[in-house]
Image (cartoon, helix red, strand yellow):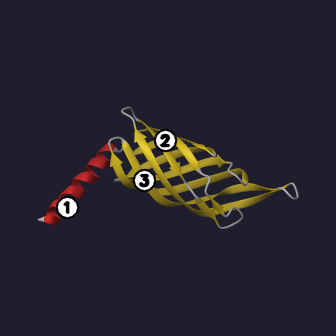
Amino acid sequence: MKKIITILFAALTVSSVAAIAQPRAVGVRVGYGVEASYQHTLGANFIEADLGFNGGINARNATMFTAVYDFSIYEINRFGFYAGPGAQLGIYTLHDAQTNRNTLGLGLGLAAQLGVEYKFDIPINLSLDWRPSFHFFGLGFRGESVMIGFRYRF
């Protein structure tokens, strides 16, 4: 009996979360740069794809494409908490203070995302997330990627 109740509770929770979520959203993320953002819902989870210009602490003029698969961790009222793995690809320039020269590089790395999202009554959502990344060439670990997102759901 305990198993049946647990399964029914899980099924109701997943179906209610999926019913609340809109299938797609487009917008922007701002913080250490600006990104165009697209989200696509897959059941209770979603895929996020972002293309943008990131500054950050060490990198200058970084243009990155990021794709993240976010797991919906918990939802309460209009707040949703999420986290997931992802990847980044792009180009950047690094400034060397000793030689006063810029170096062009390829940004290829793994990313993670942790955030919270608020869904308004109108088809708008607001998010705050942190996306640290580790790049295999040049940039190394980047943890300064806290951004605010504004998206239109449709």
Answer few, some or many: residues within 10 Å of disc 3's Cα (few below 14, many 20 plus, some between 14 and 19): some
Q: Position of residue 125 (x, y in %)?
A: 44, 39
Marks 1/2: CA–CA distance: 35 Å
Q: Which amino acid type is shown beneath numbered disc 3?
A: Tyr
In the image as oriented, which residue stretches furthest toward the right?
Answer: 99
Q: Residue at x 49, y 51 (%)?
A: 48
Q: Quadrant of the C terminus?
A: top left
**Residue matched to label 2:** 26
SS at badge 2: strand
Give the residue type at disc 1: Thr
Q: Position of residue 54 (x, y in %)?
A: 66, 48
Q: Which numbered mark, 1 or 2, is in the foreground of this view?
A: 1
- Taking the spot 50% from the left edge, 45% from the top edge, the residue there is 128
According to the picture, the residue beneath numbered tag 1 turns out to be: 6
What is the quadrant of residue 97 in the picture? bottom right
The reply to whether callout 1 and callout 2 are in contact (CB within 8 Å) is no
Give the image location of residue 129, x and y in percent: 51, 49
Res 82 label: 3
Q: Residues within 10 Å of mark 1 (few under 14, many from 20)?
A: few
Circle 2 residues within 10 Å: few <14, some 14–19, many ≥20: many
Marks 3/2 in contact by CB < 8 Å: the verdict is no
The Cα atoms of the two marked residues, 3 and 2, are separated by 17 Å
Q: Quadrant of residue 96?
A: bottom right
Q: Which badge, 1 or 2, comes first in the chain's sequence?
A: 1
Callout 1: helix, strand or loop? helix
Front one among 65 and 79: 79
- Separation (CA) of disc 3 from disc 1: 22 Å
